[in-house]
Amino acid sequence: MDVYHAIADPNRRRLLELLSEDAHSVQALMPHFDVTIGAVSQHLQILLNGGLVTREKQGRFRIYKAQPEALKEVHDWTERYSRFWTSRLDRLGDYLDRDRTP
């Protein structure tokens, strides 16, 4: 499973947000979602397979923690497009400024 598939779902992105703040069990994450515990567990498994979270057993609970360094690949890929769009929008702004000049 790749990181792009893992972050494609809004529930998984929300899980990453919550887990980047602190480690949580599935039960602690449940109040943040309007889905079943099975669905949250499946989303966490996809994030685990994508290398975006780790899981550690503490007593009878499994605690999940974000691994944000796994998102570097996504950051690097989107950064190219950020530079592209910034350049394009700057050129559009220049064009519009010239067009408004009497």
Image: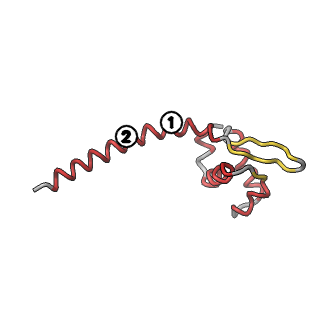
In the displayed orientation, state which residue is furthest to the front.
21
Badge 1 amino acid: Asp
Expressed as whole percent of the image width and height from the top left, the position of residue 12 reads: 65, 51
1 vs 24: above or below: above
> Tell me, what colour scheme is on the image?
secondary structure
> Which circle's residue, 2 or 1, is located before the other in the chain?
1
Residue 19, percent across and down? 69, 50
From the viewer's side, name the closer residue of 5 and 57: 57
| Numbered label attached to residue 76 | 1
User: Going 16% across and 53% down the picture, which residue do you hit?
Assistant: 99
Q: Name the foreground residue: 42 vs 102.
A: 102
Relative horizontal placement of residue 98, taking residue 63 as reference (left or right): left
Looking at the image, which residue is at 46% across and 39% down? 79
Amino acid of disc 2: Phe
Mark 1, Cα crowd under 10 Å, few <14 / some 14-19 / many 20+, is: few
Asked if marks 2 and 1 touch (Cβ < 8 Å), the reply is no
* Residue density around tag 2, few if under 14, some if 14–19, many if 20 or more, within 10 Å: few
Front residue of 102 and 5: 102
Q: Which residue sits furthest right?
A: 59
User: Circle 2 sits in a helix, a strand or a loop, which is it?
Assistant: helix
Rendered location of residue 49, percent (x, y): 70, 39
Query: Residue tagged by mark 2?
Result: 84
Task: Calculate the distance from the C-alpha at mark 2 to the C-alpha at mark 1.
Answer: 13 Å
Vertical placement of residue 96 versus 48, above or below:
below
Residue 95: x percent and y percent?
Answer: 21, 48
The quadrant of the rendering that contains the N terminus is: top right
Q: What element carries label 1?
A: helix
Q: In which quarter of the image is the C terminus?
A: bottom left
Q: Which residue is drawn at 70% across and 50% down?
A: 43
Tell me if 41 is positioned left or right of 97 in this view. right
